[in-house]
């Protein structure tokens, strides 16, 4: 097995934007593990990894997804897995996660949310338990020291959502991806009512800080001790147009989804699904 990149994709850290651009670069040589939206969705283990690797006929160069958690032991394959991730300022990430769920569940009106007393961020956290999400995502538990140890020993590269543009230049340079074309515009931005967002900060800021104490501490550690190792000291922008052509990127995106459909999904190919595909990956 050759060396491969592993994107440990934490939710609401601009990972969807990066994933789209990685798909355009790697095409069918990239795999996104589905699911992983819940805190305890750490089901993707060594056996599942090997099964997916075989499906891709050993062409895999990058694996990504929410279930790719650094605390999971992939055994003898670890030596070939080169991990990277993005961190985001925790209060912003926590609120963004809440607003995303608030929007896509129509204000938590789905039947599964009937146990929630109201649609506040407090009830949302009781229901989903996403406090200290980044610490737990990295360490598998709310353990600052373990998260730091894994970041220092296992994660090859870390970027910051707040410095997204510079992070992409750093990413391209660090992994010597000379023909990696990227764009700065971030996808999947939260579309929730700005008034709702303002009220969340106004009414629940103390709660947000209290529920994310370790994440705040970990983010400060990453920002002050890890990110400076990768931050471009003299921020001279590489010409991002010096990469794969638009046609090549489009063909790679198409090949990724055809491969995914044939080997990992069984959903029907119809007009409705094609429209969903276009809206998510091309608009």
Image (cartoon, grey):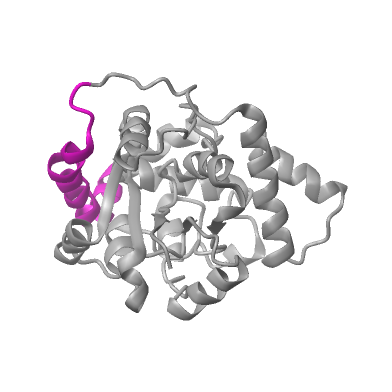
Q: Main secondary structure of the magenta part?
A: helix
Image coordinates for residue 62, horizontal then vertical, percent = 47, 55
Q: Is residue 261 left or right of residue 69?
A: right
> Which residue is found at the position 67% from the left and 36% from the top?
250
Of residues 257 and 119, the one drawn nearer to the viewer in this rendering: 257
Q: Is residue 140 above or below residue 283?
A: below
Q: Magenta stretch: residue 85 in it?
A: no
Q: Give the residues in magenta.
A: 205-234
- Residue name at image x 37 percent, y 65 percent: 69
Which residue is at a point 62% across and 70% down the rendered structure image?
Answer: 55
Instruction: Residue at 53%, 69% (x, y): give it.
Output: 53
Residue 162 against residue 87 in the figure, above or below: above
Q: Is residue 214 visible?
A: yes
Residue 173 at x, y percent in the picture: 32, 35
Q: Nearer the viewer, residue 88 or 120?
A: 88
* Snapshot quadrant of residue 148: bottom left
């Amino acid at each position: 097995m050759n060396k491969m990149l592993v994107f440990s994709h934490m939710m609401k850290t601009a990972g969807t934007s990066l994933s789209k651009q990685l798909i355009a670069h790697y095409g069918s040589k990239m795999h996104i593990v589905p699911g992983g939206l819940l805190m305890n969705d750490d089901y993707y283990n060594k056996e599942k990894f090997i099964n997916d690797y075989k499906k891709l006929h050993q062409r895999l160069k990058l694996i990504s997804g929410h279930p790719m958690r650094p605390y999971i032991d992939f055994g003898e394959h670890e030596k070939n897995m080169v991990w990277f991730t993005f961190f985001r300022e925790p209060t912003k990430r926590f609120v963004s996660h809440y607003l995303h769920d608030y929007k896509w569940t129509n204000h938590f009106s789905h039947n599964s949310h009937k146990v929630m007393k109201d649609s506040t961020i407090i009830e949302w956290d009781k229901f989903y338990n996403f406090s200290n999400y980044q610490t737990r995502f990295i360490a598998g538990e709310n353990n600052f020291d373990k998260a730091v140890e894994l970041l220092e020993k296992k994660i090859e590269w870390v970027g910051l959502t707040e410095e997204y543009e510079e992070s992409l230049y750093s990413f391209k340079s660090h992994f010597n991806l000379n023909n990696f074309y990227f764009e700065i515009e971030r996808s999947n931005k939260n579309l929730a009512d700005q008034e709702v967002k303002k009220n969340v900060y106004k009414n629940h800021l103390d709660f947000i800080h209290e529920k994310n104490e370790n994440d705040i501490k970990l983010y400060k550690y990453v920002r002050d001790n890890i990110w400076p190792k990768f931050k471009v000291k003299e921020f001279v922008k590489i010409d991002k147009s010096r990469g794969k052509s638009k046609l090549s990127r489009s063909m790679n995106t198409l090949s990724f989804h055809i491969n995914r459909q044939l080997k990992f999904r069984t959903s029907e190919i119809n007009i409705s699904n094609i429209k969903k595909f276009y809206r998510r990956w091309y608009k």
